[in-house]
Image: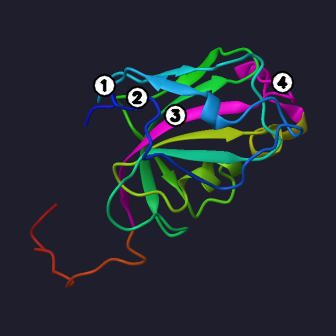
């Protein structure tokens, strides 16, 4: 799956709430994704710095297929995360996806919100205002201030619903086994 076609197309859709010009300094429409492929993250290009939004915002860059992720699912994601204030890269796992359990209410609110409803194969871009990320404390280890908006480009690699309990028939073990 390649991401070379990720820079704004007329087929893009927005979901979630949008920020107004008075609530922040930008919107996802001003951000471009360039390059990238299955192993290399796309570059997130901010039109202006600092970039901030007053409310959570998501843009679907490429539609996925299949059923939408629910609170019962685990979603495998590869992402590229930058600080909207500085443009600095915070983290990226592109090429080595991570699983996020959407039933975990301890997940960063904006991350969880952006993944709910996503479909396998989708490429998305989200802006997480401080309230949807690390709140008023920020995160000093990641050099994120309390006022920083986070910008994340991500691809939904897979999604599955874990079993509530084991399925199948019970097998008797050979008593001669150690």
Residue under pointer 3: 153
Residue 151 image position (x, y, % from top left): 64, 31
- Residue 108 in view, yes or no: no
**What is the C-alpha distance between the residues marked 4 and 1?**
30 Å
Query: From the viewer's perspective, is the residue at label 3 or at label 1 nearer?
Result: 3
Q: Are marks 2 and 3 in contact (CB under 8 Å)?
A: no
Residue under pointer 1: 39
- Quadrant of the snapshot with the C terminus: bottom left
Residue 113 image position (x, y, % from top left): 63, 55
Secondary element under disc 4, as helix, strand or loop, is loop
Closer to the camera, 29 or 44? 29
Question: Magenta residues, as a range?
Answer: 137-161
**Dot 2, how many residues are within 10 Å of its Cα: few (below 14), some (14-19), or many (20+)?**
many
Q: Which mark is residue 94?
A: 2
Q: Which mark is residue 145?
A: 4
Instruction: Work out whether mark 3 precedes mark 1 in sequence or the reverse, and give the earlier one.
Output: 1
**What is the C-alpha distance between the residues marked 3 and 4?**
20 Å
Which residue is at 74% across, 21% downward?
141
Q: Are marks 2 and 4 in contact (CB under 8 Å)?
A: no
Closer to the camera, 141 or 21? 21
Which residue is at 40% across, 48% downward?
122
- Residue 138 in view, yes or no: yes
Secondary element under disc 3, as helix, strand or loop, is strand
- Asked if residue 138 lies in the magenta stretch, the reply is yes
**What is the C-alpha distance between the residues marked 2 and 4?**
24 Å
Q: Are marks 1 and 2 in contact (CB under 8 Å)?
A: yes
Secondary element under disc 2, as helix, strand or loop, is loop
Instruction: Work out whether mark 3 precedes mark 4 in sequence or the reverse, and give the earlier one.
Output: 4
């Amino acid at each position: 799956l390649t991401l070379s076609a990720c820079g704004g197309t007329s087929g893009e859709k927005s979901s979630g709430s949008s920020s107004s010009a008075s609530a922040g300094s930008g919107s996802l429409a001003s951000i471009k994704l360039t390059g990238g492929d299955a192993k290399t993250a796309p570059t997130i290009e901010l039109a202006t710095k600092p970039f901030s939004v007053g409310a959570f915002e998501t843009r679907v860059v490429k539609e996925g297929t299949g059923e939408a992720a629910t609170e019962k699912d685990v979603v495998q994601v590869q992402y590229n995360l930058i600080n909207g204030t500085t443009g600095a890269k915070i983290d990226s796992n592109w090429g080595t996806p991570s699983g996020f359990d959407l039933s975990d209410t301890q997940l960063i609110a904006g991350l969880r919100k952006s993944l709910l409803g996503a479909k396998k194969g989708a490429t998305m871009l989200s802006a997480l205002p401080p309230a949807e990320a690390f709140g008023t404390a920020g995160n000093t280890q990641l050099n994120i201030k309390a006022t920083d908006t986070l910008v994340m480009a991500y691809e939904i690699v897979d999604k599955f619903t874990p079993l509530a309990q084991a399925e199948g028939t019970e097998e008797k073990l050979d008593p001669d086994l150690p």
